[in-house]
Amino acid sequence: MSVAHIRTDLLTWYDANRRDLPWRAAVGEKPDPYRVWLSEIMLQQTTAAHATPYFVAFTSRWPTVEALGRAKTSDVMAAWSGLGYYARARNLMACARQVTETGGVFPSAEADLRALPGIGQYSAAAISAIAHGEATNVVDANVQRVIARLFAVETELPAAARELKVLAERLVRPERAGDWPQALMDLGALVCRPLVALCGECPIAPHCLARSRGEPQTYPKRRPKADRPARHGVAYVMTHARRVAMIQRPTRGLLGGMLGLPTSEWREGSWNMNEAVAAAPMALNWCVAGTVHHMFTHFSLTLDVLSGGATTADPSFLWMLQGEARSAAPTVFRKAIALGL
């Protein structure tokens, strides 16, 4: 297997087929480290299609890292709403502030990037390569899939992660260091897809061991997923004068720092109406509005939604206009607000 031929074939394909992404520099243009960093944080556990409108909105509102570093945390958290994994937004703010305080310049070395809040091993390698042209080894899920098929790696994920990284390292060279990981990512996204590999369109198909065995879709090998535990809770939609009662969730923990509806605890067993009313934050004439189902990374959540009209706006809550509340809330609470209204 010739590394030189693989690189030449893939980069030639990339030059003709590279995706047009809003965070990607045009051919011949110097990448903006701020835009590269922001996109990498947004793309963690998120597809490019889902992240794109958020990226466009963020860079329109905060076009530089200094602008983001001076922004209000509440504004950034609200703008992040719907992207999920909200610890990323908190780390985003911490990183932007730290970079702003040190002159507004992102370091180029992978090790220095990893010292910044919210930048892990993968993100540091990606930013270093794409923004600064450093020859780092960038391995995301798309790259793992390409490498697993190219070398027909039999070890199951997640145990195979180290082996795949070592194999990917064999293909890294200083030449076109920023284009190389993006070419691998685009190949995985456009051609070497999870369920249907388009081997007839793949520029490195002649080098691919999985294809030669006639079973590319079976790679990477994976252990069967364990069932997610189920939790149950109650969400309370309290309205007054066309406003909805919201709370600021604790900084630490799931959906930390986000605006949300008051809820009961989330437990294993379901709630009956008497329990739900007893746990309510106010004594109102509660009505059952429906049920919301939401999948988090480690568990599934079922929320029974109760709605009630308040005669006064209790100052212990944040009373927001209905449209504003829905815009600022994470997805699970947007669903509940929609039902409750």
Image (cartoon, rainbow, N blue to C red):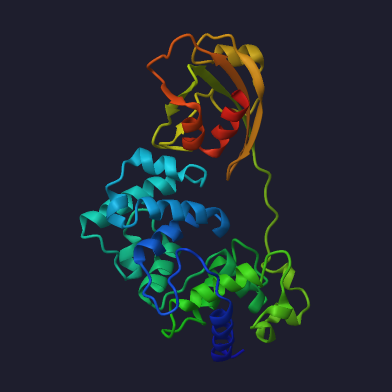
Instruction: Give the residue at x 51% y 65%.
Output: 21
Residue 80's quadrant in the figure? top left
Q: Residue 320 at what x, y percent from top left?
A: 44, 26
Q: Nearer the viewer, residue 8 or 208?
A: 8
Report whether 2 appears left or right of 318: right
Instruction: Give the residue at x 65% y 68%.
Output: 155
Q: Is residue 44 visible?
A: no
Report whether 36 appears left or right of 51: left
Number of marks present in the image shown: 0
Q: Residue 132 at what x, y percent from top left?
A: 35, 74
The quarter of the image holding the N terminus is: bottom right
Q: Nearer the viewer, residue 64 or 140?
A: 64
Q: Residue 9, relative to residue 158: is it above or below?
A: below
Q: Residue 42 at what x, y percent from top left?
A: 47, 55
Q: Residue 110 at what x, y percent from top left?
A: 35, 69
The quarter of the image holding the C terminus is: top right
Q: Is residue 223 visible?
A: yes
